[in-house]
Amino acid sequence: MTVPFIPPRRILMGPGPSDVPQRVLDAMARPTIGHLDPAFVDLMEEIKAMLRMAFQTQNALTFPVSAPGSAGMEMCFVNLVEPGDKVIVCRNGVFGGRMLENVKRTGGVPVVVDDAWGQPVDPQKVRDAFKSNPDARVLAFVHAETSTGAQSDAATLAGIAQAHGALTIMDCVTSLAGTPVRLDAWGIDAAYSGSQKCLSCTPGLAPVSFSEKAIAKIQSRKTPVQSWFLDLNLVLGYWQSAGKRTYHHTAPINPMYGLHEALVMLEEEGLENAWARHRAMHEALRAGLENLGLKYVVDEAARLPQLNSVFVPAGVDEAAVRTRLLNEFNLEIGAGLGDMAGKIWRIGLMGYSARQSNVDFCLQALHTCLR
Amino acid sequence: MTVPFIPPRRILMGPGPSDVPQRVLDAMARPTIGHLDPAFVDLMEEIKAMLRMAFQTQNALTFPVSAPGSAGMEMCFVNLVEPGDKVIVCRNGVFGGRMLENVKRTGGVPVVVDDAWGQPVDPQKVRDAFKSNPDARVLAFVHAETSTGAQSDAATLAGIAQAHGALTIMDCVTSLAGTPVRLDAWGIDAAYSGSQKCLSCTPGLAPVSFSEKAIAKIQSRKTPVQSWFLDLNLVLGYWQSAGKRTYHHTAPINPMYGLHEALVMLEEEGLENAWARHRAMHEALRAGLENLGLKYVVDEAARLPQLNSVFVPAGVDEAAVRTRLLNEFNLEIGAGLGDMAGKIWRIGLMGYSARQSNVDFCLQALHTCLR
């Protein structure tokens, strides 16, 4: 007979999930109601309004997809890319590569702009790509590369796309609520994020937002969206404003409670204060990591405060250190992905994890393991 | 400033979600751990084992998709159907229609077998469809039609498919853990369900199971799976046994705690006892509904115990009754969908909702509203 699962109590300083505050956990345990209950409709409206604040947008079509961030990514591509559409995809880490994979599976024609892992996307290369491909319909890039900790200049990149009449898809899974994300000021047409990073909710929901231009493209498609579950033409009927809602799928009720509470906490703190806290905690961690002799992967100008990638010192067994941190300190930090596997650690300071006690504890634990 | 959301405490007797026991809600609120944490890997293995028990299968590839039942459906179709593949789709309600939509979006060639809403699928029509389409590769049907409350004879239908060398995809969203589901005995190749029905977990996860024959088909596909998020070739690397797991997406950690607890409770009760309880509560509800003069939509032989569809009596404003039940009694029952909208009520007795106190309360409330 299987017994109930009691998880260990970890401190989560990897690339996500981040620590979830007790208030959010408590919200997850409130009684389930129906997904067509008027009270749930009200909840959805509040979530949409608070997500607009987080994304800094007036986009009506802003809501959480009922699935993880990867599904949010796929929703953007399957709705905005039709077979034959040319898409400029910037790849400077794992998630740019995943975008490319999405373009291929929609039948889009990808034009890849490569930058080294750990570097931000080079705007000049994007300009050149548009020059060689004036018929490109979409530019896709990752704002904050979770695999490396590099942040790209979203405003500049989106501006280039606009100058060429292309739509912009932006991955802000790791940036949303951690560093400034300003969809409207930058002119982003489609953005997706995840609940489990700087929002400090449990994993499983993907906040997304679509501009009017994006909706116009979706509504004028010549081919049906290949995914039923992610077809915005159908999802729109479910998430549109109260009263007219039609059944599409059953939303994950309790995780929505959690996301609502996480967004209430973000409102209480203030978005700009949250950005400042991530920055301040990063400065504190950085000082400590440098004291330990650790070197950052990303140049200071492009460094994400909420994801600190450092090289594993020569002669150190990186997996053994992570295992010891987990087993002795209940502390999770992240390994490298793809090309960076075995070479770097990724230390997250996301959402509720970005607090002084976590910084101190992590530095102390690393000091013990590295001395 | 938005305030925390405190949901009303409802009694859920619609078509799902069903009442969630406090033990499951409590599990949802346990501290979040990382999705690559060894403790989470153990949890996943236990969930997979208990789902095999629930599905009555030895299928190694049995796990919960990180998204609602609709995504579980889509996973079955995008992996098992290639462009040009002929698929016999049985449609006797909303969800058969959704299967058809999925076939179209994968580029499959659908052959539709229609039965009236409220009727089970007619096996003779399926035999005839195979006779006219001996090249059909897949048979798809809904075991328990949530839109009508009709149950089809899965063993017979799957047997017909086997006799013609076709794979079988079965929707058991509403049947799993409520009435017998026996994947291996029936020879089902792909099945999907939902967490929020007779498993009495919160909505958002879709248990699925695939046979060795299904895996062979997936591995010998000539075309890539159109969905990245739902591509079993990739998901396999994530859900396969401990040690070798590769990162695919971030699983919804806390909902997995909830599903684990719901499955532990199912194990404790015993699967056959759960089936018997659904049957007994149905008998009690049926006697009461008939006393109130309500007529069932579905003939007794095909009637699902866990979803009681009854015609709205002449002269009764069905929406007004549901609104009154919700507002005065905190009781949710379901409306009709599609062709049955406005004509029927759907009263669910699923999972934890299938208990005597709910039956009594529902009958009393209906009595008050209908007298």
Image (cartoon, coloured by chain):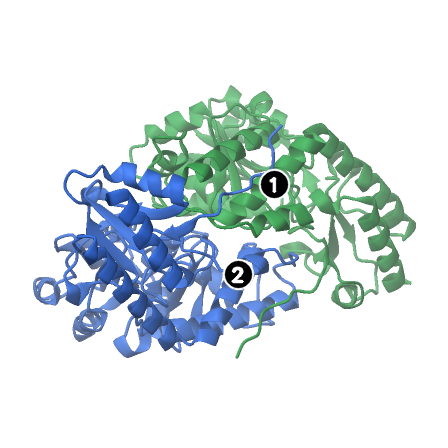
Chain colours: A green, B blue
Disc 2 residue crowd, few under 14, some 14–19, many 20+, Cα 10 Å = many
Above or below residue B100? Residue A319 is: below
Quarter holding residue A323? bottom right
Task: Look at 42% across and 76% down and name the residue there.
Answer: B270
- Identify residue for label 2: B24
- Label 1 lies in what chain? A
Task: Look at 57% across and 42% down and name the residue there.
Answer: A259
Closest to the observer: A7 or B213? A7
Q: Amino acid at mark 1?
A: Glu
Q: Secondary structure at mark 2?
A: helix
- Label 2 lies in what chain? B
Contact (CB < 8 A) between labels 2 and 1?
no
Quarter holding residue A107? top left
Could one spot residue B147 in this view of the protein? yes
Closest to the observer: A246 or B229? A246
Disc 1 residue crowd, few under 14, some 14–19, many 20+, Cα 10 Å = many
Report whether B348 appears left or right of B19. left
Percent position of residue B317, x then y: 22, 37
Q: Amino acid at mark 2?
A: Val
Q: Which mark is residue A261?
A: 1
